[in-house]
Image (cartoon, rainbow, N blue to C red):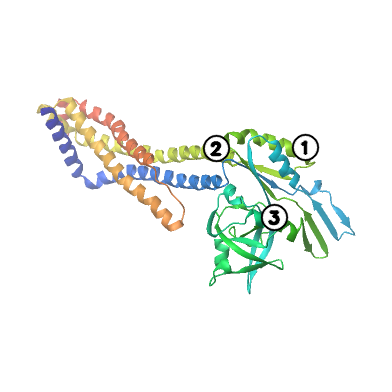
Amino acid sequence: MVSYQHFMSTVQLGVKTLMLHKLRSGLTMLGIIFGVCSVIAMLAIGEGASYEAQERIKALGSNNIIVRSVKPPEESREQNNNSGRSRGIRYGLTYDDTARIYSTIPGVERVLPMRLIREKVRFFEMEMPCQVVGTLSFYPEIVKIDMAKGRFISHMDEIYKQNVCVLTTTLAQRLFPYHDPLQQSVKISGVYYKVVGLVREINTPDERPQSGETEGETMENNVYIPLATAKARFGETIVKRTGNTVNSETVQVHEIRVQMKDHTFVESADPQVRTLLSRFHKEIDYEITVPLQLLRQAEATKRMFNIVLGSIAAISLLVGGIGIMNIMLANVTERTREIGVRRALGAKKSDITTQFLVETVVLSVGGGLVGVVVGVLTPLIVTHLTNMQTIITLWSVVLAFGISGAIGVVFGIYPANAAASLDPIEALRHE
């Protein structure tokens, strides 16, 4: 009990000594405050950026393999010229590729072919650029989109080639600001389509696989129609006129999404799909994306990013610790006579060591607490001002505060030992 009271009196003496020099103590704490704040804030910003990237990848489906048609390089295209005015090219995925993948690759649950056509959707005088997506009824289950209203296209719509469509909510709000979309029809390329549902879709460039000009449309401007309807209404050839030249591109399928039964099949299916397609395609007119691999790369990048950011921010803490040690060494010189008086009155070396350690720990822990508050507020301010997502993790707060406390002990030991090692007689003679 006596030792506890003795320790508390030493702590009170250390705090009182620091309060005698408030400005100097406050300036000494600034290094720790900024160090702790930078660790928490930088890790929060990095965590937020990493989270957004991983969520976009997860939206593609960790059990999916995405195959997209890609134009081959100019020098490898086989073009048919007609008096220099007409040029045509055929490339990309086919419906036979869809059937082969489904019947050949082990572990395949479903295969979703899609056709993507740049068009304009019209409702009376309102006209918007859009991407028409010809797809099948189970598209929402593979791509993971939510129905906001109504229904998605059905299997019967596909069989009977119905002129029905599903709009994204953003596009519907622009086309029908004062009407119920489910009671309206829109016009695409001279054909009317009845709106049967609205979907919410994530705004990500990965949902825009078709090459070519975007004509300024946003990522949410998708119109979904049955695949059979898309084949019947738009055909497989897209014709573009440039001056006196007519360019045509023939693509059967713009994108194939392969859903595996489990993510354990994805790694083995990736090379099998590549081998299968290479057998039936003379040139590389497709690209394969595996979201599971991208997710693992994103997680590895996140860990490396956190290490780099944490290391950079930790330098600020190190500088703050050096500042504390510098001030405490100056205190030892300044208070040499005081130390001599205390030793002459019976204070032990451990008492002197404890007093100086208490002062350094109070500086570092006090600075750490203020730094935690500022560090938590900084990401919130960044999010409010820039709409950038930040995530404050408990481990970053504990790590930053723990390091600040450890710095107080580590950088306070040498000044404390230096003070305790002073010769009492020489200290009393010090002016």
Q: Foreground mark, 2 or 1?
A: 1
Label 2: few (<14), some (14–19) or many (≥20) C-alpha neighbours in 10 Å: few
Residue designated by label 1: 279
- Tell me: residue 174, above or below residue 350: below
Percent from the top left, x then y, of residue 275?
A: 72, 35
Residue designated by label 2: 296
> Which quadrant would the C terminus be assigned to in this image?
top left
- Tell me: residue 159, above or below residue 430: below
Q: Foreground mark, 3 or 1?
A: 3
What residue is drawn where x is 46% and y is 47%?
Answer: 48
Amino acid found under the numbered disc labelled 2: Arg
Q: Quadrant of residue 400?
A: top left
Nearer the N terminus, badge 2 or badge 1?
1
What residue is drawn where x is 29% and y is 35%?
Answer: 408
All told, the count of numbered labels is: 3
Residue designated by label 3: 159
User: SS class of the residue under badge 1?
Assistant: helix
Amino acid found under the numbered disc labelled 1: Arg
Label 1: few (<14), some (14–19) or many (≥20) C-alpha neighbours in 10 Å: few
Q: Quadrant of residue 183?
A: bottom right
- Tell me: residue 254, above or below residue 104: below
Q: Which of 298 and 256 is in front in this view?
A: 256
What residue is drawn where x is 41% and y is 41%?
Answer: 313
Percent from the top left, x then y, of residue 101?
A: 70, 40
Q: Residue at the right extreme?
A: 83
